[in-house]
Image: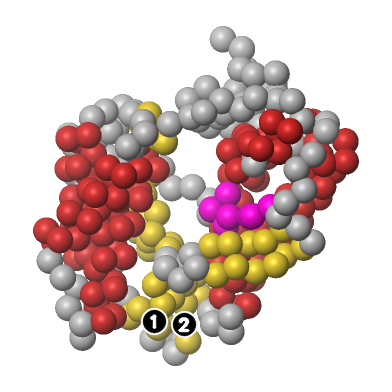
Amino acid sequence: MHTDTFTIRPSSLPSYNDCARRTVGKAYPFLLRDAGYMPRELSSSVGAAVGSGVHRAGEYSLKHKMEDHGNIGTDADAIDAAVAEFDERIDEGVIWDDTTPTRDTAQKQIGIMARMYRARIVPHIEPIMIERRIELEYAPGFIISGQPDVVANVSTVHRPGLRDTKTGVIRRANGAQYGNYAALLNSVHEEIETITEDFLQRVPLSKSQPEPESHSLDLRACLALAKATNDRIVRDVNTFLETGDIETFAPNPSSMMCSDKYCPLHSTDACPHHRKD
């Protein structure tokens, strides 16, 4: 059995709460292979790749703002950086969807969302820290490792706050991810007071781009959910290392992501629970 350190990525926590088995198949495929299971190799989803592109445009803009007296750089340079990030993400394959069926569509969507973010969100952010990698030993054999998007001054409380950018066809529940970011920031004495998620919806080019939505989340609730989820991961992985029983990781065949497109264990002997056609 595999005994090296397990890395808990903050972004994996919402997924773990949706379907622990799918998430383990993606995060720790070696763990399952060591037990005789064979997770399938999956290409990136176009939604995730578009999100990474838009995120890169935001990072470019905010770094410029922080380092160049408020200048956020040009739309063209931000979008070039975003498209380069997108292309890198899909270099080894991508799963297209109805909202983004081609690379040309993706490029145009990235450009639209990047401009919207720069015009509507960036002017209201005073960045302090951008994309700093932080690691924290959580339990024996487990570390949390992540890069909070942005820590920014929040004028209403005169203390730092976390800002995170999300894109997608629908807005999902990401509180556990933000709770782990808060824990990481606490560990380096960069305590935050607020959490804000900036959401840009990914829509077909035939529709107008909706305005961004900025949502506040409860810091204490996010920290509590993150801790509970981290504890589940530690408990489940350690139990699996002892028993090799795949049922240790709870499946969720009701998940929207329960599909051979998105789950490396779908249609394998590691998960017989998915809904049969």
Residue 187, relative to residue 120: is it above or below?
Answer: below
Q: Give whichever of discs 1 and 2 has the lower sequence position.
A: 1
Q: Nearer the viewer, residue 71 or 220?
A: 71
The residue most toward the right is: 242
Q: Tell me the number on the disc at residue 128.
A: 1
Element assignment for label 2? strand
- Seen at 65% across and 69% down, the residue is 136
Residue 70, image x and y in percent?
21, 82
Left or right for 36, reference 61: right
| Residue 189 lies in quadrant | bottom right
Q: Tell me the number on the disc at residue 160.
A: 2
Residue 190: in magenta span: no
| Residue 63 lies in quadrant | bottom left
Q: Could you tell me if the residues under marks 1 and 2 are in contact, i.e. CB atoms within 8 Å?
A: yes
- Seen at 61% across and 17% down, the residue is 267
Residue 36, image x and y in percent?
74, 25
Q: Which residues are magenta?
A: 6-12
The kind of residue tagged 2 is: Pro
Crowding at dot 2, Cα within 10 Å, few <14 / some 14-19 / many 20+, comes out as many
Residue 67, image x and y in percent?
26, 81
Q: Tell me the number on the disc at residue 224.
A: none
The kind of residue tagged 1 is: Ile
Residue 134, relative to residue 66: is it above or below?
Answer: above
Regarding residue 163, the answer to whether it shows in the image is no
Q: Nearer the viewer, residue 200 or 270?
A: 270
Label 1 or label 2, whichever lies nearer to me, is 1
Residue 10: in magenta span: yes
- Seen at 27% across and 42% down, the residue is 87
